[in-house]
Image: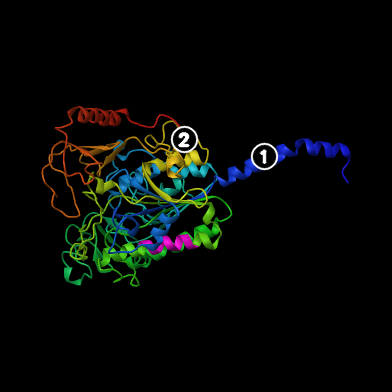
Amino acid sequence: MLPRSLVRIAQRFLPAILLFTLVSAASAAERPNIIVIMADDLGYGDVSCYGAAMVQTPNIDKLAAEGLKFTSGYCSASTCTPTRYSLLTGTYAFRRKGTGIAPPSAPAIIQPGTETLPGILQRAGYKTAVIGKWHLGLGGPDGPDWNGELKPGPLEIGFDTCYLLPTTNDRVPQVYVHDHRVPNLDPNDPLWVGDKKPSPDHPTGLTHRDSLKMDWSHGHNSTIHNGISRIGFYTGGHAARFRDEDLGDTWVRESRKFIAENKEQPFFLFFASHDIHVPRMPHERFQGKTKLGFRGDAIVELDWCVGELMKSLEEHGLTKNTLVVFCSDNGPVLDDGYKDGAVEKNGKHRAAGPYSGGKYSVYEGGTRTPFITRWPGRIQPGVSEEVVCTIDLAASMAELTEQTIAEDGCLDSLNVLSALLGESGGKGRDHLVLQDNGSSGTFGLRAGDWKLLRHEKKSARNVKVEQELANTPVPVYQLFNLVDDPAEKRNVIKENPEIAKKFQDQLQSLIDAGRSRSGR
């Protein structure tokens, strides 16, 4: 039995001890595991919970049913490299040169010392991994040393580990990168990557077109691997090469391994799927599953990957303590360089949903994509009209994990955590700058119900699902009311000159300011 003096002390401090315990438990509960699933070239209308009828995505639909489905969820650019750059750095890609679509041997675009989403979470005690498509360059100024150490790369900007497709699969080389090296490389068969034909008799999609199992339509006619010709040239590294059909299985295997190894501590997984980017070559068990050809089959494979990740969380009892964000790096495109049946078999499917444009375009179809957040017990299921963007994950996750962002970092990432969690009164963005690939100077500004487009060139590469406006002349400025005209069919700039001038000035001011984040 305790002495009475100790009993009195215990009674005196017990409430404080209990309060501290409860606060500590609450703080721990607010450090969920975080999984960001980024699809590739997936449009707003490509999944069934956003209206697709010709393809079914039950696992993505379940995420939406158990979480928050955003109707105004955006990526920051309508191509992959700039969106991925902005996701990880929290800074608009147009603020940094060299963030257009990265070539096969691009050096690291995000340099060590840059404030990043994984770096912020690493400071908060998270184990961090990126698994899947990278396409942000590797190595120093001269590019990757494919047969040596591939650094700087993900491990130098906040990731503890990575298992990558180094570029994008229509670009060479078809090898994986695990942390700093290409696994399974035979030193007697070194890997060479270049932008010129290595020898006169080197097989390409031009010289050996009859041998291809998937023909090219434009641009993808250099080195052949797995019966598919690519952008760029490479030789060697045969023991390290992969089959296109196995990419999805590889990402799932490595992700499940990472989750299992880190289930006892908070972790951040950036699952960067290659589906449904070209060349669309899903695993054989998914081929023929839809009437949309390999493009639709790749959507089914993506949905399977999502389901496998969710199963892994369930197996380890992590579902209720994991925030899942599902998004896409840009809008859809049908013919992106290969004759895979996407155009011919599209039928009534509207990959961009009700919106115009697609990949490469700053019309809504290029940047408004599926966007879902799920955290059982924390996020109440529903639908949100708040404007959120992938660029905001850095500031929002910093808020969630009580981290301070460097003053010179994440220059355009805004804290929209309350909107992402669906909290009462939670607000998203009141404005968002959108870009295409960054080389044309074409921008969009979404502000409330309005959308201003600025085309620096007199004609825009507006790759539309229906193609009726592709490469047609457009004015330098266009103004649309997205409530009245979500498909951006009616340019109302002449009827609203004052509104147009206001947004023209705002857009230029945001570009010139060098940042749009004012603080933490």
Say few, some or many: other residues with alpha carbon within 10 Å of mark 1 (under 14 / 14 to 19 / 20 or more). few
Q: Is residue 175 visible?
A: yes
Q: Which residue is mark 1?
A: 20
Measured in 3D between alpha carbons, the distance from the residue under mark 2 to the one under mark 1, in whole angstroms, is 27 Å
- Residue 303 sits inside the magenta stretch: yes
From the top left corner, tell me how far across and down residue 515 is, in percent.
35, 31
Judged from this view, the residue extending furthest toward the left is 473
Q: Nearer the viewer, mark 2 or mark 1?
A: 1
Q: Secondary structure at mark 2?
A: loop
Q: In the image, which residues are magenta? A: 302-311
If you read the primary sequence from the N terminus, does the residue marked by circle 2 or circle 1 appear first? 1
From the top left corner, tell me how far across and down residue 192 is, in percent.
31, 58
Amino acid on which disc 2 is placed: Ile
Q: How many marks?
A: 2
Amino acid on which disc 1 is placed: Phe
Main secondary structure along the magenta-highlighted residues? helix
- Taking the spot 17% from the left edge, 47% from the top edge, the residue there is 461
When asked about the image quadrant of residue 169, the answer is: bottom left
In the image, is residue 239 above or below residue 459? below
Whether residue 386 sits left or right of residue 349 in the image: it is right
Whether residue 506 sits left or right of residue 319 in the image: it is left
- Taking the spot 27% from the left edge, 66% from the top edge, the residue there is 294
Q: Secondary structure at mark 1?
A: helix
In the image, is residue 359 above or below residue 239? above
Question: Is 282 or 26 nearer to us in this picture?
Answer: 26
Q: Which residue is mark 2?
A: 405
Say few, some or many: other residues with alpha carbon within 10 Å of mark 2 (under 14 / 14 to 19 / 20 or more). some
